Image (spheres, rainbow, N blue to C red):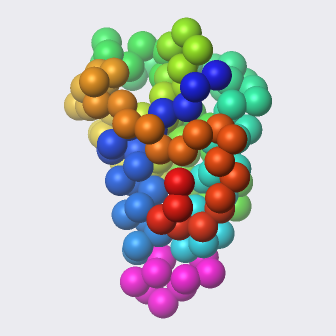
Amino acid sequence: MNLFVQEAGAQDILDQVEWYAGKGLPEIARRFHGAVLNAIDALIAMQSAAPPKPTGNPSLVGLRAWPVAGFDVFGVYYLLRDELLIVVRVLHDKRSAKRALTKRKCSHSWVCSYRSVENNHRSPGKG
């Protein structure tokens, strides 16, 4: 299984890490980053564990969501395509997720490598 995170998904992660750090909460920033990586690792192991969600966006047919443990208001939104797990977004709560995903175009040309499955680094900025 190959893993890719779209540009918007990587930016979601970075934005939240920077938000916590900017609030003077560097340990929470590190925990969030690690929790997202752990959620992605869980998805690699159990790709089909979450059921597909209706989105109203034809480019996101088959979209699934997985919670970020310890940060339960966040979800990893992902697609499965052949041997590819694509993280589309990492979003806070269902309202922002619905708004962000109904207008989002998903294209494999947007997919960028975030980290390889073998890479076990857990610190922000590495990957």
Please tell me which residue lies in front, 118 or 48.
118
Please tell me which residue lies in front, 77 or 2.
2
Q: Position of residue 32 (x, y in %)?
A: 59, 64
Residue found at x 38% / y 19%: 60
| Secondary structure character of the magenta stretch overall | helix
Splitting the image into 4 quarters, where does residue 117 fall? top right
Magenta span covers which residues? 20-28
Q: Position of residue 91 (x, y in %)?
A: 44, 49
Q: Position of residue 107 (x, y in %)?
A: 29, 22
- In the shown orientation, is residue 50 left or right of residue 108? right
Q: Is residue 22 magenta?
A: yes
Residue found at x 60% / y 53%: 36
Q: Position of residue 11 (x, y in %)?
A: 35, 53
Splitting the image into 4 quarters, where does residue 101 fall? top left
- In the shown orientation, is residue 124 left or right of residue 99? right
Quadrant containing the N terminus in the rendered view: top right
Q: Is residue 110 magenta?
A: no
Residue 79 seen by the camera: yes
- In the shown orientation, is residue 57 left or right of residue 125? left
Please tell me which residue lies in front, 17 or 95.
17
Q: Return the residue found at the far bottom.
A: 24
Splitting the image into 4 quarters, where does residue 41 fall? top right
Residue 53 seen by the camera: no
When the figure is inspected, residue 66 is found, relative to residue 31, above or below; the finding is above
When the figure is inspected, residue 55 is found, relative to residue 67, above or below; the finding is above
Residue found at x 36% / y 31%: 111
